[in-house]
Amino acid sequence: MNIQKAASLKSHNTFGIDAIGDLAVFQSTEELPALMEKTTHQPTLILGGGSNLLFTQNPTGWLWKNEIKGIEVLDENDDYVIVRSGAGENWHQFVLHCLRNNWGGLENLSLIPGKVGASPMQNIGAYGVEIKDIFHSLQAIRISDGILVEFDNQSCAFGYRESVFKRKLKDQYIIVSVSFRLSKRNHVLKTGYGDIQKELEIAANSEPSIQDVSRAVIAIRSTKLPDPNMLGNAGSFFKNPVVSTSIADSIQEKHPELVFYPAGDSAVKLAAGWLIEKAGWKGFRRNDAGVHARQALVLVNYGEASGKEIWQLSEDILLDVQAKFGVTLEREVNII
Ligand code: FAD
Ligand code: EPU
């Protein structure tokens, strides 16, 4: 356990915002009762890798950073394995561990920053896969009474960038481990999304493995998304909005090139990056807050931007997209 009052949070968030807060780092659930005593009250924020949040002010109250480690197999047969990871394991390192063992299911989710414990929070997703597709269960401590509770797939109420932990149970649980059901044989690869197929063709790969798909995803992501170690960001700042087909039709009348995907009966998901680019924001910069030049959905910190400046930029974009297209964007990043 490591406790620091008035710590710099700059290296604890991938936007690189220079906020100050009281920080407690813990490595096991056994430390929690003592932590509760030492920090005199409950945490106001559980921190993972800080890759999906924006500090717009110095947080009041304690931040508890979860560094619980350990990966273990809970069950397996010839077809599948159930593998459990501590919440504090790095997500991409966990994916690489599974790839080394030839367990299929996580390959499309390669190179997503952050910790395993945050992955159920917004049901992380990329390239046609969301964790709900391979999620088995998770264990979480209820903050009010310290009881360990198990959640299955259904009780997490996963949706697109959604879970019960972002809604009804917000700030009520500390996720301590997450388990996944991965394939050991007859795994069906998902290579239909975006440029994966093209990337595999470049590698002249007609019978790709899970490792090949992972390499393809890493190659695509590296060309589009800024590396937070080089340029502060938290990935997509907004969600891709789901709208009625009639709204999409009216936009498409003026813009036949509109980018959208099917999203159930009489609804479509629009590419927010397209809306923001079309509204003229791609590559925009105000002081050190900006819109990424290769991906308009990603807001960036060129160095010394404050969280408030980034938030204000997001608000200006939101209002402009609303005025130009009649579509209200929703922030995906957690605003603190
Ligand atoms: P944090 O930012 O630390 O926390 C996020 C939220 O989860 C906070 O509300 C926090 O309180 C809560 N939380 C964290 N850990 C716990 C815990 N153990 N128990 C309870 N609550 C907890 N996301 C995608 O879905 N798909 C992508 O393709 C993707 N690409 C990205 C690319 C880049 C370059 C970046 C910077 C981010 C990207 N993201 C993506 C967003 C981010 O990587 C994910 O949301 C990730 O899961 C956040 O993990 P974290 O540990 O950094 O969480
Ligand atoms: N587009 C533009 N201009 C841009 C960016 C995108 O026109 O500046 C259009 C393009 O037509 C492109 C389409 O939008 O084909 C989709 O873009 P991309 O494939 O880059 O994906 P995205 O919809 O912008 C989503 C996720 C990402 C995830 C990728 C790949 C959300 C909010 N974002 O982005 O997740 O990695 O798909 O699956 O759903 C994240 O959540 O932080 C994140 C990075």
Image: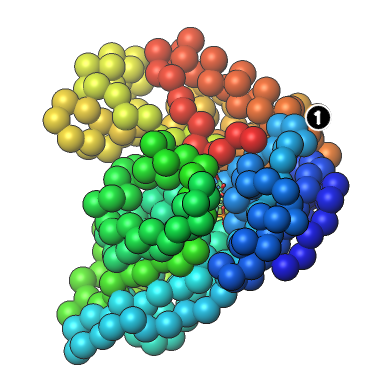
Q: Crowding at label 1, few (<14), some or many (≥20) Cα neighbours within 10 Å?
A: few
Vertical position of residue 124 compared to residue 150: above or below: above
Is residue 78 left or right of 226 when viewed as pictured?
left
Q: Quadrant of residue 183?
A: bottom left
Give the residue type at disc 1. Asn
Return the x and y of residue 189 as percentages of the image width and height: 25, 69
Residue at which label 1 appears: 287
Return the x and y of residue 328 as percentages of the image width and height: 43, 19
Vertical position of residue 105 compared to residue 102: above or below: above
Is residue 48 left or right of 159 when viewed as pictured?
right
Return the x and y of residue 271 as percentages of the image width and height: 39, 35
Q: Which residue is located at x 17 percent, y 80 percent?
A: 186
Q: Which residue is located at x 66 percent, y 28 percent?
A: 311
Q: Quadrant of residue 320?
A: top right
Vertical position of residue 1 compared to residue 121: above or below: below
Q: Quadrant of residue 73?
A: bottom left
Vertical position of residue 84 compared to residue 13: above or below: below
Is residue 78 left or right of 211 when viewed as pictured?
left
Check the picture and name the quadrant holding the N terminus.
bottom right
